[in-house]
Image (spheres, grey):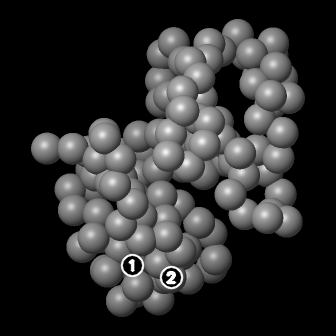
Amino acid sequence: MGNPLCHVVLHANGAPEAKKFYGEILDWSFDDMQTPVGPYTIVGVGVGIGGGIMANPGAGTPSHWLAYIQVEDVAAAAKKAAALGGQILQENTDLPSGAFDVIADPTGAAVGLFQGAS
């Protein structure tokens, strides 16, 4: 399948509580790290798509999971999404592992686009 889901991130209003909940209910492991924007927790799920937990960056926004889809060219994919009636919510964010954008489809549903480092 082209463009698979590759990562999911919980934007949590209360990351410690979320880690406790998911650790106990699903037996996930966690690896905490510091990033330029604050603490980030890598989630180890064993088999399947991994993810992370971070403080919710949207003030007043409920906690939510954001899925990321792997693309070859994140800038081109975001531009195409906008041309098709979507909206770019967060543009061209570089990470050591690659780069991502967050878009909304024409219905308002948000999803991340991720391009791995080359």
Report helix, strand or loop for mark 2. Answer: strand
Q: Which mark is residue 81?
A: 1
Question: Residue at 84% across / 39% down in the picture?
Answer: 14
Quadrant showing the N terminus: top left
Q: Quadrant of residue 54?
A: top right
The reply to whether the C-beta atoms of the residues labelled 1 and 2 are less than 8 Å apart is yes
The residue under label 2 is: 87
- What is the crowding at mark 1: few (fewer than 14 residues within 10 Å), some, or many (at least 20)? some
Question: Residue at 49% across / 70% down in the picture?
Answer: 90
Q: Which mark is residue 101?
A: none
Q: Quadrant of residue 107?
A: bottom right
* Vertical comparison of 35 with 42: above or below: below
* Vertical comparison of 27 with 1: above or below: above
* Vertical comparison of 3 with 51: above or below: below
Q: Position of residue 59 (x, y in %)?
A: 79, 64
Q: Which amino acid does the dot numbered 2 rest on?
A: Gln
Image position of 95 (left or right of 10): left
Q: Position of residue 29 (x, y in %)?
A: 62, 13
Image position of 45 (left or right of 88): right
Report helix, strand or loop for mark 1. Answer: helix
Image position of 18 (left or right of 85): right
Question: Residue at 74% across / 16% down in the picture?
Answer: 23
Q: Which amino acid does the dot numbered 1 rest on?
A: Ala
